[in-house]
Image (spheres, grey):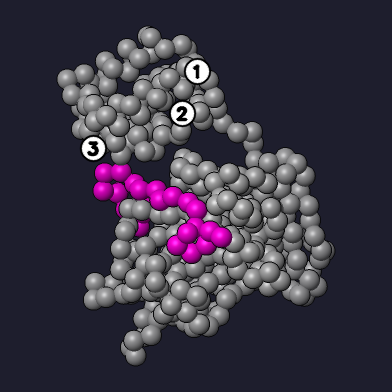
């Protein structure tokens, strides 16, 4: 890959950028999508990424020096390594997925998903009543799951919260979902994970990993957050990720993921790792609550102390559309537990019991 193509790929430029001149705010926004310098794993790449970050962070523009000339100049002074792809991790075998290939209006696959039900506020003063109705969670016949929040004439709200609890749990790996989220005041879409021992130890000791959460009133920003004992709720550890140049997450699909091992969790949007958390980031004396199995959740909440509440500008129904959910292993360090004995004694994958992927 040429240096010019590498820059366009990393920053998301189109092939015709050529001699376009970019403003300081655009450069700042694009620089926020770059990996940290040490991700480059070579002195040449580290120098290159530091140069681009410095360019944006100091509001230095390329006005008068079009990229058509600037990029080849960089290629002339940097070693050949700068023209190569960023080092990619080794292949990740797929160990579990749902591609949502069922017929139109079919319920989610009940060998993979079950429901949280009711209107308890869910610890966040939420308004929705979670149901198992196909009015609130259904496959669209086009390879998608739709989670739909609806408003009733009497002023209440219904939605769905799906989970793999009791069916599949995961310890480490790459967990991702391709999702087009809704937007609007008081709407709260999420893709997240909860420690499988929640019934034994309670929250937050079980641990929680919010792979993606969004306040509907902030359509360009999602959040990745970790909760555990001593760092939960408003003290959770994570970071926001904001799209550049006025883009909105509700306008198209995006890939939300975590890379998770025994001692770290990295949050990603569209393949870019924007926050990495390790035990050293925890408050002094706090417990790392992410070294055991977790289950997956997908939901659209309505209202709550974090996103606020719907108002006259909020339209219903609100839909979160999920293209797929996939879990990958890194050879030797992911464990997938399938427990589907209650479903006619067997799962579609075979006999009941636990499966460990090594």
**Could you tell me which residue is drawn at 53 percent across and 56 percent down?**
226
Q: Is residue 4 left or right of residue 331?
A: left
Alpha carbon distance from label 1 to label 2: 9 Å
Q: Secondary structure at mark 1?
A: helix
Give the percent coordinates (x, y) of residue 122: 51, 76
Determine the residue positioned at 61% across, 55% down: 286
User: Is any part of residue 244 visible from this angle?
Assistant: yes
Residue in the image at 38% along x and 13% along y: 75
Q: Residue furthest top?
A: 76
Question: Label 3 belongs to which residue?
Answer: 25
Q: Is residue 250 magenta?
A: yes
Label 1, on which residue? Answer: 43
Alpha carbon distance from label 1 to label 3: 28 Å
Establish if 232 lies above or below 131: above
* Disc on the earlier residue, 1 or 3: 3
In the image, which disc is placed on residue 116?
Answer: none
- Could you classify mark 3 by the number of other residues whose Cα lies within 10 Å: few (under 14), some (14-19), or many (20 or more)? some
Q: Is residue 171 left or right of residue 11?
A: right
Q: Residue 16 magenta-drawn?
A: no
Q: Residue furthest bottom?
A: 154
**Residue 100 visible in the picture:** no
Mark 2 to mark 3 CA distance (whole Å)? 21 Å
What residue range appears in magenta? 230-253
Residue in the image at 63% along x and 64% along y: 205
State the residue position of label 2.
Answer: 37
């Amino acid at each position: 890959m040429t240096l010019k193509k590498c820059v366009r790929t990393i920053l998301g430029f189109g092939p015709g950028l050529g001699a376009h001149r970019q403003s300081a705010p655009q450069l700042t926004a694009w620089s926020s999508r770059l990996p940290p310098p040490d991700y480059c794993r070579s002195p040449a790449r580290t120098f290159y990424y530091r140069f681009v970050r410095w360019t944006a962070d100091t509001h230095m523009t390329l006005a008068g020096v079009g990229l058509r000339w600037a990029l080849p100049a960089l290629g002339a002074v940097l070693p050949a390594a700068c023209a190569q792809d960023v080092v990619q991790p080794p292949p990740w075998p797929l160990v579990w997925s749902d591609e949502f290939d069922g017929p139109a209006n079919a319920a989610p696959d009940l060998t993979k998903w079950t429901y949280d039900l009711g209107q308890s506020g869910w610890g966040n003063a939420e308004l929705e009543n979670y149901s198992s109705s196909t009015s609130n969670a259904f496959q669209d016949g086009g390879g998608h799951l739709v989670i739909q929040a609806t408003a009733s004439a009497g002023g209440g709200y219904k939605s769905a919260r799906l989970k793999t609890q009791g069916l599949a749990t995961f310890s480490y790996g790459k967990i991702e979902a391709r999702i087009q989220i809704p937007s609007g005041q008081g709407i709260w879409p999420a893709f997240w994970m909860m420690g499988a021992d929640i019934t034994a130890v309670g929250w937050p000791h079980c641990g929680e990993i919010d792979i993606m959460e969004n306040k509907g009133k902030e359509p360009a920003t999602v959040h990745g957050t970790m909760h555990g004992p001593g760092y939960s709720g408003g003290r959770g550890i994570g970071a926001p990720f904001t799209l550049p140049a006025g883009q909105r997450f509700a306008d198209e699909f995006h890939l939300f993921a975590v890379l998770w091992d025994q001692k770290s969790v990295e949050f990603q949007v569209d393949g870019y790792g924007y926050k990495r958390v390790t035990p050293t980031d925890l408050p002094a004396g706090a417990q790392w609550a992410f070294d055991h199995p977790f289950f997956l959740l997908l939901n659209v909440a309505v209202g709550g102390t974090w996103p606020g509440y719907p108002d006259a500008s909020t339209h219903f129904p609100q839909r979160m559309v999920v293209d797929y959910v996939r879990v990958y292993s890194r050879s030797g360090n992911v464990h997938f537990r399938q427990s589907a004995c209650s479903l006619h004694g067997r799962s579609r994958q075979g006999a009941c019991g636990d499966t460990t992927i090594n």
